[in-house]
Image (tube, grey):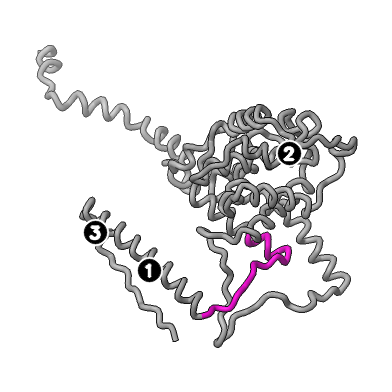
Amino acid sequence: MGNTVSCCVSPGGSPKVSRARRQPERPDVYQVEAELYEPDSGPSLQHISDREVPDDLAPESNPSDHPRASTIFLSKSQTDVREKRKSNHINHVSPGQLSKKYSSCSTIFLDDSTVSQPNLKSTIKCVTLAIYYHIKNRDSDRSLDIFDEKLHPLSREEVPEDYCRSDPEHKHIYRFVRTLFSAAQLTAECAIVTLVYLERLLTYAEIDICPSNWKRIVLGAILLASKVWDDQAVWNVDYCQILKDITVEDMNEMERQFLELLQFNINVPASVYAKYYFDLRSLADDNHMNFPLESLSKERAQKLEAISRLCEDKYKDLSKAAMRRSLSADNLVGVRRSNAVLS
């Protein structure tokens, strides 16, 4: 009968016995999981944008790729801005006559610079000022031979011996960039993309922009930005006609190495572009470089209304296309619009 007892145990009895024996082990498992996932640590599922970041490049150190990271030029300029404000406060220096115009009930002042269509002259001034702060407040003088102006001169004029020790002034950088943009007929958007590529190069290649290499780094960034952004790109031989003394082979080699240092990452997301645009506006305000303001006339108001209607028509077309593709409830939310009244 002993065998009968051992053989006649119900099929569900064996799992119950085994589960009863494992019960003391469960609290240890839960305790380990509780230690690994504390309530303060947040969800364990990582965002896709965080997973795409390389392990050796944190988001906060790569502003040219991630919209949440602060731009390098704006952080480098804050040191000088704080010193100027402190000096003015100590010396009781008055700001003088206010040059900035403010809107009133009867007059509205607007500048002609937007994210999609920035003002060319003001944007180039801001971009060159950002480059100036990069050079002035650099951490060291790390560089590469391909960008060294002594090894690869841009003109036949002899490079002075102290070329690597004297920082260029803002007006010299502006004159150099303005000449290239005027001769190649580049747009203001290209200037912003140029700054994005410049900071991406400094981050990826771990170099500094300094007096010995700033011209060739800026030239390489402009060359690449003009080919990526503009529909009718300027050829390398065209830059040789602008700078006269540089060879096509040198331009090709600099472009090739520039791309390799960028790891062929020439993508500029719209969020990153917008971040650089508004940070440049902040840089202009900190340095009293106000964008040109004009009163809103009837002609300008009609022009703005025409642009608004054009964007509205594009939005309607996109909404109709989205409704045809999907019947999601998200597309059923309408947008209330009011017509502008011009006196």
Q: Is residue 37 left or right of residue 238?
A: left
Q: Of the numbered discs in the image, which one, if any, rests on residue 208?
A: 2
Residue 174: x, y in percent? 73, 53
Residue 157: x, y in percent? 84, 37
Residue labelled with disc 1 = 309
Q: Quadrant of the C terminus?
A: bottom left
Q: Residues within 10 Å of mark 3 (few under 14, many from 20)?
A: few
Q: Are marks 1 and 3 in contact (CB under 8 Å)?
A: no
Q: Of the numbered discs in the image, which one, if any, rests on residue 329?
A: 3
Mark 2, secondary structure of its residue: loop
Instruction: Name which quarter of the figure residue 222 lies in.
Output: top right
* Residue 114 against residue 102 in the figure, above or below: above
Kind of residue sitting beneath label 1:
Arg
Kind of residue sitting beneath label 3:
Ala
Mark 1, secondary structure of its residue: helix
* Residue 23 against residue 279 in the figure, above or below: above
- Is residue 56 visible to us here? no
Using the numbered discs, state the Cα–Cα distance from disc 2 to disc 1 in whole angstroms. 46 Å
Of residues 55 and 274, the one nearer the viewer is 274
| Residue at horizontal 58 percent and vertical 70 percent from the top | 111
Residue 205: x, y in percent? 66, 33
Q: Nearer the viewer, mark 1 or mark 3?
A: 1
| Residue at horizontal 12 percent and vertical 17 percent from the top | 5
Q: Is residue 24 left or right of residue 189?
A: left
Q: Is residue 98 left or right of residue 272?
A: right
Whether the magenta-drawn stretch holds residue 293 is answered as: yes
Instruction: Name which quarter of the figure residue 213 lies in.
Output: top right
Q: Nearer the viewer, mark 3 or mark 2?
A: 2
